[in-house]
Amino acid sequence: MIRDFFSHNFAKVREINQKYSKPNVEMSGWVKGSLLFLRLYLVLLVGLLLYKFITLL
């Protein structure tokens, strides 16, 4: 009973994930550039956190 419940729900989740695995959203150049900038900023922040952690050891 419980196994059927979980297997049925996992099948639903897999179906939804397959449906939306490829986004259909069109992005302008500005949006792509902004997302790239945010990714680079995130990498910079993580790098600074790691640097600070290592130097405090």
Image (tube, grey):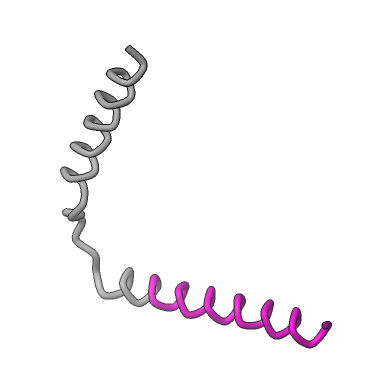
Q: Is residue 10 above or below residue 3?
A: below
Q: Is residue 19 above or below residue 25?
A: above
Q: Is residue 24 left or right of residue 7?
A: left
Residue at the location (21% across, 46% down)? 20
Instruction: Give x and y (percent) for residue 51.
Output: 70, 85
**Part of the protein shown in magenta:** 35-57
Q: Nearer the viewer, residue 57 or 45?
A: 57
Quadrant housing the C terminus: bottom right
Q: Is residue 44 left or right of residue 7?
A: right
Q: Is residue 29 magenta?
A: no
Q: Main secondary structure of the magenta part?
A: helix
Q: Nearer the viewer, residue 31 or 8?
A: 8
Residue at the location (24% across, 23% down)? 8
Instruction: Give x and y (percent) for residue 35.
Output: 39, 70
Q: Is residue 55 above or below residue 6?
A: below
Residue 22 image-quadrant placement? bottom left
How many marks can you see? 0
View extreme (right): residue: 56
Residue at the location (74% across, 84% down)? 54
Residue 49 image-quadrant placement? bottom right
Q: Is residue 55 magenta?
A: yes
Instruction: Give x and y (percent) for residue 1.
Output: 32, 12
Q: Is residue 34 left or right of residue 44?
A: left
Residue at the location (33% across, 69% down)? 31
Instruction: Give x and y (percent) for residue 27.
Output: 24, 65
View extreme (top): residue: 1
